[in-house]
Amino acid sequence: MGHTPEQDFVLSGGPGTSVHSARSGYLPVPLRCVPHTALKEIAIYLRNRAEAGTASESAGFTLYRDADVPFTAEDRERLLASGRHFIYVRIADQVRYRAQTERAVADAVEDPRLAVAEKSAIVYETSVELVNELLTEPDLVAYSGRVEGLSRSISTLVLNDPQAFSHLFAASHHDFYTATHMVNVATWIVPLAHALGYRAMDQLLQICQAGLLHDIGKVFVAEEVLNLKGRLSDEQWQLIKQHPIRGWTHLKSFAGIPTLVHDVCRQHHERLDGSGYPDGLAGDAIAHVSRICAVVDSFDAMTALRPFKQRSLAVADAVLELRAGVPHWYDAEIVDAWVQLLRGVHDADFRPATAGARAVPAPKPEGAERRRNKRYKCDCPARVNPLVRTADGGLHEKPGIQVTIHSLSSFGLGFLSPRALEVSRPVRVYLQAGTWAGRFVHGLVARCRAYRDSWFEIGVELYRDDPDGFEV
Ligand SMILES: [Fe+2]
């Protein structure tokens, strides 16, 4: 049997004791994501690589370092250089390993020898492990010290390094399991709050804890409902909507949890216009940090791969969606600060805020006659769906674009669009806010002109005899 370089390395790097054991007896530890000091007095194993021509998984593990031999940073580098990405510890050592990891994370974030990317990966993965445990047994008496410790590490990382966000963002997973979602929100909300002026460690610490715990109420929602494929029934949706209150009630049952953490847990699905849940709070009645949480929470929900969605949105599309939610759902200032952070990561423009659907001048009047119709400037979110004629002469509605209507009259409406719409194309426009919420109107695209920053200014002439039409 020929040795792969890794097998040679195992034989030269440790005692080489072959261990045949069930796979489940070992916990995989991603090498990049654990500080080497976390492995003090813990035996480390390597998984045997499959021999050529056999199944890809080999059942055995080989002892690499006994518990009394220190595992060093150099060991880690050598393993990584040899193509190893995981080491293994016995399940029996799991509790000690986790406790040591969390203690070591605090030192790692202050360690000048470690790159920020590495610190970010360590903090991120350790947080996911902790939240996974927390979701299994949400006893905050046991976990509050650990949640605070990791929150302090995340906050320190952000306070010490202006580039921390891009590394934390790069370290994040997009699977929308509850644990990774909570850690995404926690590791994104701190840099965003920092950018918005929260600079004190005490504030950031609480904000981070709020991020880590905001969805704790999902523990009380059945997993089948959370991960359901396909559309949710009304009943299932009602169950999911209970999670802010269930979480808040749970947090309230423990002493010493900051009020801000309670607020964010309860309010992160509230929206500025009062259309959110569970309390229908509006404007300043929603705590500022809850409004910050709403933006990163929504962004993760849009971009994550979820079991019940066909596809996730690209970052640029999610930015457009967030912008379309200003000002009725989200604060403009918060969305702008978030987009600014994302620009640093993606080196992309995301179409500057000046082209956003808010604060847009109404199109110039096209003749005095038009002026006779009462015309309103507004910021009404709407979905515009093109209609196409089918072979049998009917009209088929295609998925459209989310826009913000800036002017509205009984005869027409105007909005900026990220893409062109064909003149004379029939459209159905679903209005989503104010007294028009839930209504739709029909019309034809009457004009489509290039606007600045690659947007299009679009006018729709409404059908006069539309049975669904209404007086504005
Ligand atoms: Fe939530």
Image (cartoon, rainbow, N blue to C red):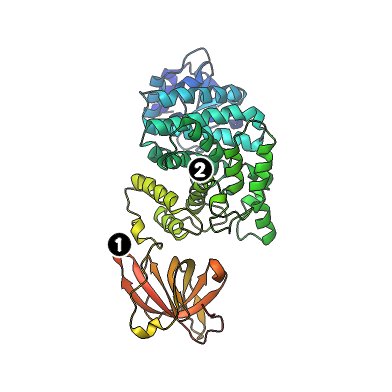
Q: Could one spot residue 62 in this view of the protein?
A: no
In this view, 128 is above or below 65: below
Which residue is depicted at the point 49% across and 22% down? 104
Residue type of the residue flagged with mark 1: Asp
Q: Is mark 1 within 8 Å of ligand 1?
A: no
Which residue is depicted at the point 45% across and 74% down? 408
Tag 2's secondary structure? helix
Which residue is depicted at the point 56% across and 23% down? 99
Instruction: Pinpoint residue 213: horizontal percent, then vertical percent.
Output: 58, 39
Residue type of the residue flagged with mark 2: Val
Instruction: Pinpoint residue 436: horizontal percent, then vertical percent.
Output: 55, 71
Numbered tag placed on residue 453 in the rendering: 1
Q: Nearer the viewer, residue 173 or 358?
A: 358
User: Which quarter of the rendered picture does the N terminus lie within?
Assistant: top left
Answer with mark 2 or mark 1, whichever residue precedes in sequence. 2
Numbered tag placed on residue 38 in the rendering: none
Tell me the CA gap for discs 2 and 1. Answer: 30 Å
Q: Nearer the viewer, residue 127 or 470?
A: 470
Q: Dot 1 surroundings within 10 Å: few (below 14), some, or many (20 or more)?
A: some
Instruction: Pinpoint residue 191: horizontal percent, then vertical percent.
Output: 43, 39
Q: Could one spot residue 391 in this view of the protein?
A: yes
In this view, 425 is above or below 320: below
Residue tagged by mark 2?
185
